[in-house]
Image (cartoon, grey):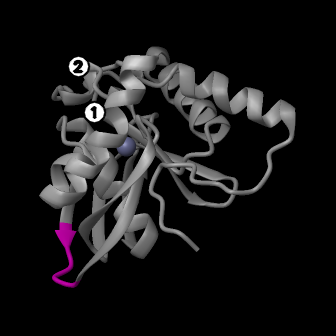
Amino acid sequence: MDEHVEGQVIEEELDPERETRRRFALAQIRQYPDAALKMQARAVEQFDDELRDLVRRMKLLMVDAHGIGLAATQVGVLRRVFVFQLAEDDVRAIVNPEIVERGDETEVSDEGCLSIQGVTVPVERSLHVVIEGKDESGEDVRYELDDYEARCVQHETDHLDGVLMLDRTTPEARREALGVLRPRIVLT
Ligand SMILES: [Zn+2]
């Protein structure tokens, strides 16, 4: 299987209704080079209904867009919160996430991004991380993650610092990706 963090590099045919939902969701996700994607998100201080509404909306968008992760900066909200798929039908939110442990072992694998449609680039990530933060109700959460999930939360945490996979890849892959992205930006 292709590695694709966030991205929906799905070859399967979608039924027309799901495809419409996917397009509608993607239209609500900021696309490169939107300025919000380069901005630093601020810590969340209040665990209120507004935060829970944001999390609910992000979970729906992520699922509809066929992603496995989505950061608040990608919907133009500069708060430190992201959602990610922990298991099938189990999407979690982490507020004010901190990666508290990174394993020494790393792997280079292709990543995609819901905000950078149509390209994947190789990124080196730790294979094992421990991440801590709060859930949308303000309860402490801690996840020990490997492989795919570990890669995903590193990608999402980067988003909250305005760092994109294009900033983490090789100069060659970056150049190639920008070559694909530029003509499309002109057309849309
Ligand atoms: Zn992304």
Q: Give residue 119's mark.
A: none
Looking at the image, which residue is at 28% across and 25% down?
Answer: 33
Count of all numbered marks drawn on residues in the image: 2
Between 155 and 174, the residue placed more toward the observer is 174
Magenta-colored span: 101-105
Q: Is residue 128 left or right of residue 19?
A: left
Looking at the image, which residue is at 35% across and 56% down?
Answer: 153
Tag 1 secondary structure: loop
Question: Is residue 97 visible from the viewing direction of this image?
Answer: no
- The reply to whether discs 1 and 2 touch (Cβ–Cβ < 8 Å) is no
Query: As displayed, is residue 135 above or below residue 143?
Result: above
Residue placed under numbered mark 2 in the picture? 35
Residue placed under numbered mark 1 in the picture? 80
Instruction: Specify the farthest residue to the bottom.
Output: 105
Query: As displayed, is residue 138 above or below residue 87?
Result: above
In the image, what residue type sits under mark 2? Ala
